[in-house]
Amino acid sequence: MYKYDHLDNTLVRERAAQFRGQVARRISGELSEDEFKPLRLRNGLYLQLHSYMLRVAIPYGLLSSSQMRALARIARRYDRGYGHFTTRQNIQFNWVSLENTAEILDDLAAVEMHAIQTSGNCIRNTTTDQFAGVAADEIEDPRPWAEIIRQWSTLHPEFSFLPRKFKIAINGAPNDRAAIAVHDIGLSMLRGPNGETGFTVWVGGGLGRTPMLAKPIRDFLPGADLLSYLEAILRVFNIEGRRDNLYKSRIKILVSALGIDRFRDLVEAEWAHIRDSALRLEGREIARIRARFALPPYDANVDSGPFAAKRFEDAAFARWSAANLFPHKQPGHAAVTVSLKPVGGIPGDMTADRMDALADLADEYSHGEIRVTHRQNLVLAHVRQDRLFDLWRALDSLELATPNLMRVTDIIACPGLDFCGLATARSIPVAQRLSARLAEIDERHDLGELTINISGCINSCAHHHVAHIGILGLEKAGAESYQVTLGGSSAKDASIGKIIGRGFGADEIVAAIETIIVTWLELRHDGERFLDSLRRVGQTPFRDALYGQDSRTE
Amino acid sequence: MARMVITANRLRDGAVVWRSAAGNWSPNITTAAIHATGEQLTAGLAAALADEKSGRVIGVHEVEIETRGGQILPTRLRERVRADGPTVSFA
Ligand code: SF4
């Protein structure tokens, strides 16, 4: 794992000290809210419906067990005993008070963590594949590159006041597990003609009010040029991006207004000036960062016999193994997804006690390392196959072993109107009711891979546009109304879902989703995924089932 | 005019508070002063904004309500959630 050096340490400690002073000045009345708000947002502190909320950065979703314990302590001491993992691979504390925030930042700094750039119009946490470094299908570990981007973008003076927030995702395998198509910049790694590391660069993806998939701007960017090229893109965006209209300020709008070719010309012209500047990454520097992501020492002689035997003996273990294990590049090992989606539970929430227990399991089974996924689950990435059964039993006793990765109960949901100041409808109770209902149907019919994401407003934090079934909560005539989109995907076959028809009330939405699934089961080919059936038959059967055939002419 | 109460979040901890006739801010909506006329509301808001300026509260705004069985109920769901807390238990 990346260890802070002296510079990193000084920076986060100074930042906490500065914020302590700013809070004191706010409370004494020296700073007005108008003056203070940008300062608190720079430290990840939002005012939500019931309280302040602190968003803590987890760079590329990677945590040590001691960091997880620190988060548990914070949850207990300053919050109500739990935290909420987000689709940005970060964690949010929903109930913090302004007076305690500086102390929390101190506690975070002590374990090399912070809340810098988790808000505001700056470059946010770079996200990546939760299986980075261990995935069997990987070209190269993207985390050193994500760390290089983190160092470059942290407090970057030129990019502190961008037209709008900016999100970068990086994926190191041919299969996209980082949703790069819906990011401001998406980087997908590949090898050049001489085996050198490079990136295909995508730009202008995003969700929200105007969902768009990213467009390719460069087929092959040599690794050494990564930062200069990113800087060129950001510079063009910073100068040309719109600042007059919040809804038109993201880079996706600029790219589509100029057209990708014109945008590329501007970037390349800018790049020509800075390509050979100090931003050029030296091999030595890349190697230095890479060394910090060295994989733990694996045992080359793990006997996978017991694992196979246990799967044969224990159906529940077999089911969990089929759903929540991921192939590891090291024979005899597996990457384990720890589900934060118990049936009927709140997606992404975790109690302090479970955080502590999981930290212990990480020490025992996975070299003390934990990852946060953009699906709001956790991963133990280095587990020996002969210990999987013991780990599963331990997870099961903590209610962290729901066998549902990428299945219908693995719902992504934002905090919605129960917490979020921007929300137009609730997401969590809908997720809970759907999960309880759909678990039964999945049990009977084995629905396979089927993703459902629920956002509580058009800001789309739960990425509902790229779910196989997306749900968007709106407010219509004072009541909650849920709009359904079908056919989204954030994987390699990325697509934006299409709205199926008029919205459903809070008391109708679960039945509507059930109707969609029942309709699908009738036309499903053997073992087919929902998304593939939908792509085969189109929306009409689903629309007919929901609204009746008469609605076709409406 | 629809009847209104005045609300904000407490500066120090962000808690939802409601303004009483005596000018206190309480987490309990039942103590909120109900403004039935435009003048009352304007006067209430002016006093509330003065509290915002002095740093007691932030995000002052008025909320439309109805009363049922002596209870004060905001008409919009957002404000009902603010008054009653999240509709879900946590974690
Ligand atoms: S999608 Fe909307 S309601 Fe949900 S967290 Fe984002 S801003 Fe809040």
Image (cartoon, helix red, strand yellow):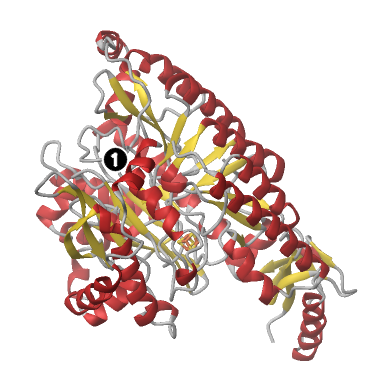
x and y percentages locating residue A236 in the rendered image: 33, 76
Q: Residue at x 68, y 59 (%)?
A: A19
Quarter of the view holding residue A320? top left
Name the residue nearer the viewer: A290 or A78. A290
Total marks drawn? Answer: 1
Q: Quadrant of the N terminus of chain A?
A: top left
Q: Amino acid at mark 1?
A: Asp
Q: Is residue A532 above or below residue A445?
A: below
Q: Residues within 10 Å of mark 1 (few under 14, many from 20)?
A: many
| Host chain of mark 1 | A
Name the residue nearer the viewer: A433 or A378. A378
In the visual, does A520 lie left or right of B53?
A: left
For label 1, the residue is A141
* Residue A418 in view in this figure: yes
Q: Does the residue tagged 1 have its C-beta within 8 Å of any atom of ligand 1?
A: no
x and y percentages locating residue B37 in the rendered image: 76, 88
Q: Residue at x 77, y 88 (%)?
A: B42
